[in-house]
Image (tube, helix red, strand yellow):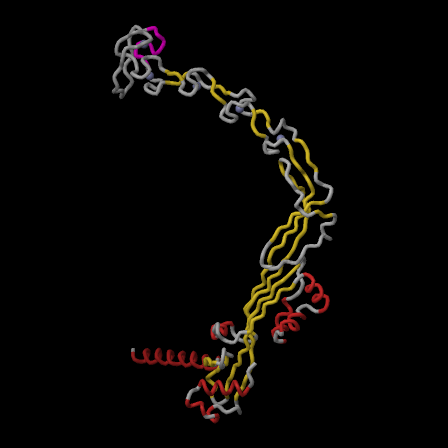
Amino acid sequence: MLSDDDILAAVRRGLGAAGADPAAFPAHGARITRHLLVDGEIVRSVETREERTGFQPGSPDLSDRPRYDDLDGYAIPAPSDPRNPSTLLLVRRGTVDPRPCVCTNGRRQCPRCEGAGDVKCPAYVPCGGCKGRLCCLSCEGTGKPALKAADRPQGETGTRVRCRECGAEDTACGKCRGAGQKKCGVCRGSGTRPCPVCERDGTIAHEYCEGTGRYVRWTEGVVERRPVVDAFKETSSLPDRAFAWTREDDAWQHVDTLDTLDTLDADLDADPGADLGADTGLDPAVAAYLKPRLGHHDGEVGRRVRVRHLSLARVTHDDHPHRVHVVIPGPVTPRVVTVRSPRRTRQLALLALVVLVAAVTVARLLS
Ligand SMILES: [Zn+2]
Ligand SMILES: [Zn+2]
Ligand SMILES: [Zn+2]
Ligand SMILES: [Zn+2]
Ligand SMILES: [Zn+2]
């Protein structure tokens, strides 16, 4: 952290030639306050454990899955990076139960054709040319000519041909020649066609066992770990815009710690966040700031704390009440950002108001 002398020297440098003389910005009358900017995240790996029924069709090999007797007591190493979610599937010892399925070798009767392999199909279909509108003006497809031929349907323009049914000239539809219907193209007039579901087999694969004829059930233990992120960006007693005064290459202090299950337990018994101060050489002010955030969450099995922090100095002087100098530690020397004091900002706003009122008054007097 910068000393008061370093801070005043930086302000004088920032004032340029005028400030080179210590008398221009004397220590007497200067007020220095220090503020912390903290920015980072705490990522916890939070674990849940539950049992459910495992099921797989066929004869799956479960031998590579870990076995347990007591799911809560089953030890699993801490996550190497709490940011990564994971799911571990385990098998409760002695619960694997392979069985033959109720179906026949994985197949069951086709529900569409009920095992027949084919389905009904109309042998004849209506003619596409006359569409049921007088296939023959004389017999209408019956083969028995009427005494008086019917009139052509309204709007019909096509040519009529000799009827194959009754023999009358120029009376029949050109497509069906008086029959009114034609043989079905699908079944070629046979009246049946292959079942579209089982393709003539009469059986289909059983969904439950996926056609294998077998399945396995067991008690499955599921250990789920997911990251819970607590991100923050805060200052101690400075407005949020203070972050805009900083730059990436300022002297931010970086902390990155990974806590495993073991160290967490030890630390949490003693004092949450204690390791942050001790192991990482973290500034005690930062450790104190983070401490309320470091409580143990239900199911927490690991955490990663990544923080950067920067200590700024805010300098005002009785001789220059309108200015605030912010001294920011840089990579080599501190840098100074000069901003208007809140009091000066209020004064300027008030001045603007006075000018406006005056202008309005003058305008009224002149009108
Ligand atoms: Zn079928
Ligand atoms: Zn047909
Ligand atoms: Zn006819
Ligand atoms: Zn026709
Ligand atoms: Zn089955």
In the image, residue 138 lies in the stretch drawn in magenta: yes
Question: Where does the image place residue 248, in percent across and percent down from the top left?
Answer: 48, 72
Relative placement, left or right, of 21 versus 171 is right
From the image, give the main secondary structure of the stretch colored magenta: loop
Relative placement, left or right, of 258 versus 173 is right
Of 30 and 359, nearer the camera is: 30
- Looking at the rendering, which quadrant does residue 108 occupy? top right
Question: Where does the image place residue 303, in percent across and percent down from the top left?
Answer: 63, 62
Q: In which quadrant of the rendered image does the C terminus lie?
A: bottom left
Say above or below: 39 vs 10. above
Give, as a single range, the part of the protein colored magenta: 135-144
Residue occupying the point 67% across, 51% down:
49
Q: In which quadrant of the rendered image does the N terminus lie?
A: bottom right
Residue occupying the point 50% across, 25% down:
199
- Looking at the rendering, which quadrant does residue 96 occupy? top right
Relative placement, left or right, of 314 versus 220 is left
